[in-house]
Structure formats: structure tokens, C-alpha cells
Amino acid sequence: MMSSLADGIVRRVEHLGDSVSERFFEPTIRLGVTGLARSGKTVFITALVANLLDRGRMLQLAAARDGRIDAAFLQPQPDDTVPRFDYETHLAALTGPKPQWPDSTRAISELRLSLRVAPTGLLSGVKGPRRVHIDIVDYPGEWLLDLALLDKGYDEWSAEVLERIRPRRCARDFLTQAQAVEASLPHDEGVAQRLAKGFTDYLNAARVDGFYDCTPGRFLLPGDLAGSPVLTFAPIPFNSASQRGSIHREMQRRFEAYKRQVVQPFFRDHFARIDRQVVLVDALSAIHSGPRALEDLRHAMADILGAFRPGRNALLSRLLRGKRVEKILFAATKADHLHHSQHPQMTAIIEALTREAQDRARFAGAQTSALALASLRATTEEIRSHNGDDLPCVRGTLLDSGKQAAFYPGALPDDPSELLGPARTGLDTWLVGDYQAMAFAPARLSMKHGDGPPHIRLDRAAEFLIGDRL
Ligand SMILES: Nc1nc2c(ncn2[C@@H]2O[C@H](COP(=O)(O)OP(=O)(O)OP(=O)(O)O)[C@@H](O)[C@H]2O)c(=O)[nH]1
Ligand SMILES: [Mg+2]
């Protein structure tokens, strides 16, 4: 009896000792990578990992430049139920003989990269190398927008959505369908499914039209929840007390189930554990789509970042219990669509676009930064003369035709308010300037031994996100 008790205590102490020393000597950084659909998350993670494995192009990451990273290797991730980020397949697509962009991913995934780092400072003579684990978690930014649903009941949400989408052309069919529903009639699964389908079709069309407020997030990215009751609801007009068993009651019930069984688990199991976060933004595409899209993107950014201001939401405050994200980087992706002479303007735009969100995050104690980067550089730069002007262009292979072309996206203003101002006032088109977008195919690479794939400022991003822990 005594001995088994003692045994138990010793074992428990040993166990505790393990985890303490592991945490002490092998720190883990949980790095969240998010952004709205197509913002460049998969390419960012693939390029970051490839460049941390082969660090020849990572001079702005001090530990890499100083040769303190002895080794980098991929390891089994700690979470057994999260799909692994398919690094090898994505890298093969990007760097193969016929380079291609990776397929859309649309769900959460994770990858553990471990670095062996030589110690610095006073202890460098006596201590051996340390291991630092970086758990990279890729998740859709749309899931963060769902946080706002937690504070709302079905009726409030429903009324708000119907009001907001009323002017939108892409919402017409759904609005007609929703108006025709008699919400007090007994629930009928066929009706619910047709409504949910109509609403999902609207959300997809809205995204194509450049709207970013496309929530609930899982309607667009259902994964294995497709067709289940938690995703079979929609906003419908309603104005009297509802009966048990009515369409309205069932919609209400499913909305609550979505919050409880889809939104809350994501925040609890994934979001609450993140230490450092990068938020990717495809600002150039929004500018190309016009003032409304840019204004909408600004709103979406503020909403996304609302999640990083604990205290805003009771559930989040409870989950985080004082823990907070330490650093947040806002990165404008695909900067290789711009000549480097336009990068400062792009950075100013991304800063202005996320200013509100950044101020909130700073308020919550997180350190924030903004930059323009290209995870995988697909272009080269050249100056072309056009009507007597020198235009700073980029050249690459066009995605649709496979032809080489030089491209000039338009003059970005030095003062970002020249774009954000008209966006706020709800103009339909830009008054001055016209902004083009272009899709390039990834370039064929011939990489030197020890070099990762070419990028722009990926090393600066890494220095900000993990440099202080290496
Ligand atoms: N030129 C260039 N294009 C890029 C870069 N990164 C991403 N892109 C383009 O953006 C598209 C989307 O990139 P992904 O990394 O798949 O974006 P994502 O955020 O993972 O997209 P989802 O998984 O659909 O949410 C790619 O197919 C490329 O066309 C880059 O560094 N340079
Ligand atoms: Mg992806």
C-alpha cells in the first residue's frame, strides 16, 4: 500500500518534472496563420517552412544570419486530431518542373517545425544547443468573423443580416425566397434545406462580388459538416412570437447549435492556444475590385482583429484567462505584383487599413507590425517607358495564357487616405487612378544548395514573429 502510494507520487513528480523541463528547455511557439480566402495562407506557410529548412535567403532573421540555427526539421505535431499541413505536396506543386499554385485548403491544419539553436549571451559557453518547436496552425479568417455571432441571438442576427444585404444585387434571389417563407408554419426539412442552400449560394456569390462579411464561416467552408443540421439554417423575416415546432423555432435552435458546437470549440481548442499570429491580406485585389471592396475589407479586418481583444467577449475572456497573443503581424501578400518602388505605399495602405484593428490589439498588450511581402516571388522587375513616362513594372508568366508579360498595376498614392477616404464614402469606382490585378504563375526555380525558394521580406516576417525566441 505504502510503496504503491509512494510510487504513484514519485511518478507524478517525475511526470511534472518532465513537462517543466520540456517547457523550460524546449519552448514551443504556437504560430497562427490566418487571412480571408485566397489571401495566401498556404503559400506563406509552405514558403516559410522551406526557407527555415534552407536558410540561405533569410538574412533578416538574425538567428539564421548569425549561423545560430544548427538544424531545422519537421516533427510529428502535438495535436492528433488536427489534419497535418500537407507541406510536401504544396512544396512539390510550387517548385516542381511545372510549377503550380497549391489547391485551396479551406480548413484548419497544423505542422511542427523544430529548430536547434545555439545559445547566446553569458550562457553560450556552458550550455548546449536548445530546441525550439514552432507549431504552425493554418485556419480560415472567416472563422474569426464568427466570434461576433456568439453575442447575438438568432432574431437579432437574422434582422441584421437581412438589413445589410438588402441593397446587394447578389442577394436578390435569396431575399425573395426568404420573404416568401411563413416562419410560423410547422418546421419542414425541405423548406429549411432550400433556404440554407439559397443562403449559401448568396454567400458564395457575395464573396465573388468582393464582399468579405460572408458569415457564418462554415457555410462557405463546411468540410465534414456539409449537409448537417448545424449548417441548415438561414436568416428569415419574422415578427411575431413563435410556436414550438415552427420553422422559426427550428432555425433559432440550429443557430444556437452552430454557436455551441462549431464556433465555441474552434475558439476553445485552437484560437485560445495561439501565441503569435500573422494575418494575411490581399490588399491589391481589393483595391482592384474598387472602393466598396476596400471598405468592406477594412471592416472585415477590424472584425477579425476584434477576436484579439479579450474582454470583448465573455466566452473568450473565460477561455483565455489572461493569456494573450503576444505579437500580431499584418502582412500584405503577393507584393511581387508590385515593383519594389511601390512597396512603401503598399505598406502604408496595409497599416492604414488595419489601423483600427492594430490600435485595439496594442490596447490588449500585443505587439503589432505591418509589412508587404511575397511568400513566393513569381516576377522580376523592369522599367518600361510608356508615353514618355518610366513605368516601374513586374514581369512574369501569366496564369491563364502561360505567356510572359510586363505588368503595371497603377500608381498607388503616397497617402493611403486617398484610397481609404473614397472607400469610406461608398463610391462605386475610383475617381483618380485605375488599378489592375494580374495573376502570375509561379516561376520555374533553380535553387542554389542551401537556399529556399525566392521571396520578398519573408525573413523580416519571421524575425518579427519568432526572432526574439531564437
Ligand atoms: N504572385 C504571387 N501570388 C501569390 C503569392 N501567394 C499567393 N499567391 C496567389 O494567391 C492564391 C492563393 O494562395 P493560397 O496560399 O492558396 O491562399 P489561401 O489563403 O491558402 O487560400 P484558401 O486555402 O483558399 O483559403 C494563389 O493561388 C496564388 O495565385 C505570392 O507570394 N506571389
Ligand atoms: Mg489555403
Image (cartoon, helix red, strand yellow):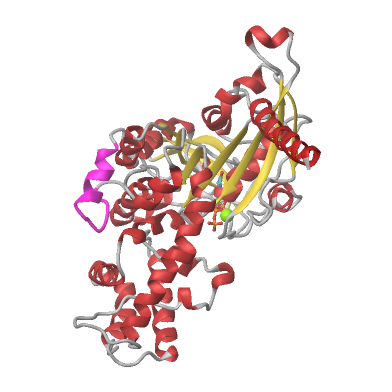
Residue drawn at the location 35% of the way across and 41% of the way down: 354
Q: Note whether residue 303 is visible.
A: yes
Q: Is residue 135 above or below residue 296?
A: above
Magenta stretch holds residue 66: no
Marks counted in the figure total 0
Please identify the quadrant where the C terminus is shown.
top right
Provide residue 92's location: percent of width, then percent of height: 74, 50
Q: On the picture, is 226 further left or further right than 75?
A: left
Q: Nearer the viewer, residue 15 or 379?
A: 15
Provide residue 93's location: percent of width, then percent of height: 70, 53
Q: Nearer the viewer, residue 410 or 43?
A: 43
Q: Nearer the viewer, residue 401 or 326?
A: 326
Magenta stretch holds residue 428: yes
Residue drawn at the location 34% of the way across and 92% of the way down: 186
Q: In which quadrant of the rendered view does residue 55 lie?
A: top right
Q: Is residue 47 above or below residue 261?
A: above
Residue drawn at the location 29% of the way across and 53% of the way down: 291
Q: Is residue 275 above or below residue 107?
A: above
Q: Is residue 210 above or below residue 392?
A: below
Residue pushed farthest front?
1
Provide residue 198's location: percent of width, then percent of height: 40, 80
Q: On the picture, is 354 further left or further right than 458?
A: left
**Magenta stretch bounds:** 416-431
Q: Nearer the viewer, residue 19 or 373?
A: 19
Residue drawn at the location 22% of the way across and 70% of the way down: 163
Please identify the quadrant where the N terminus is shown.
top right
Q: Note whether residue 446 is visible.
A: no
Q: On the picture, is 121 further left or further right than 414?
A: right
Q: In which quadrant of the rendered view does residue 51 lie?
A: top right
